[in-house]
Image (tube, rainbow, N blue to C red):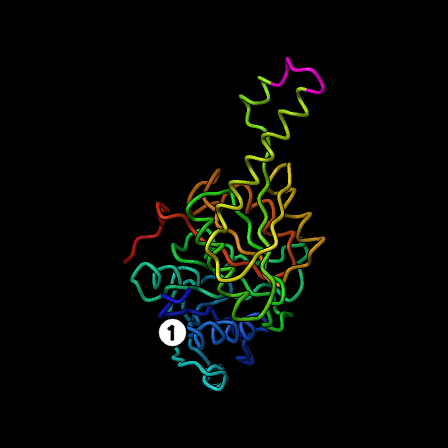
Amino acid sequence: MDEIQSITVGVGVHPRTGEPDVGSLRAARQAAWVARQTGATVTLLTAAWAEDSSGPLELSDAAKDELDSLALMVTADGATAEIEVVEEYPWLAIVRRALEGKADLVVVGKRSQPDGGRRRVGSTAVKVLRKCPVPVWLVQPGHDLLHRHVLATTDLSAVSRRAIDAAAWIAARSEGELHVLHAWNLKARQQRAAAELTEEEYAQHVEAARAHAQTDLEHEVAGLDIDPTLHLERGDAHVEILKEVEEEQPDLLVMGSLSRGGRPGFQVGTIAERVLDQIDGSILAFKPGDFVCPVPAD
């Protein structure tokens, strides 16, 4: 996280009053918190675009005043803020900023309340999460920005290690706790081999696999600046993540295995798609190094 130099915040404003929505306000303050630690510049980006997607519209004077006030709030929080108004789909403008190297981190707000379909993440935020090549932080509007309990999930991949490092960075600067979850299970070939074992042999087989997973997890968190609490659970990853979130109630869930099993730009991966709308709290999501953004830079 120390390498972050530019942060883009997606700001949604009310079409009549020009007031930023609650999620945008909290996202701006979260961005300011990161910027204060790293020296990054915060860009408040809003789209002068009709809600019915019919095209660009004139940003009201009230909206401009509200954006100025939001920039002053970010400055008061100890960060440098600038405003950018674009005339295109907001998610597209955000993704293009990242592609152009103008954003190392994107921060957007979640819904204050689930919509009628119980979606906790709005359509713009989902598009950004699916398509943006840089880390995306979805901020829960009710969060007070104190990260007392940070939960990182890992599948032991390179991108998961990036997620763990980020989670450790956030927890350490918040004087909070870091928890790391790894869900494991017997691989298909192990299950086939276990089919002919006795009950005692099968128990030994499972214990050996569990011990191997424990060793891998301990190796994964070696060298962190903060001592994590490790959670090793046998089962499907999305099930174990939801169980852990329900039990631990973390302030922030950090995920690093978002592209596997999904179509880049259309899904964030099987695991993330299954948990995204079932988690109330904030989520920080990383893309793997070989992620290919479906949006052209120009």
Circle 1: element type = loop
Q: Position of residue 209 (x, y in %)?
A: 58, 31
Residue 199 painted magenta: yes
Q: Position of residue 102 (x, y in %)?
A: 32, 66
User: Visible in this render: residue 239?
Assistant: yes
- Residue carrying label 1: 40
Res 212 quadrant in image: top right
The residue range painted magenta reads 194-200
What amino acid does circle 1 point to?
Ala
Q: Residue furthest top?
A: 196
In which quadrant of the rendered image does the N terminus lie?
A: bottom left
User: Visible in this render: residue 48?
Assistant: no
In which quadrant of the rendered image does the C terminus lie?
A: bottom left
Count the marks.
1
Q: Position of residue 264 (x, y in %)?
A: 42, 44
Q: Is residue 145 above or below residue 135?
A: below
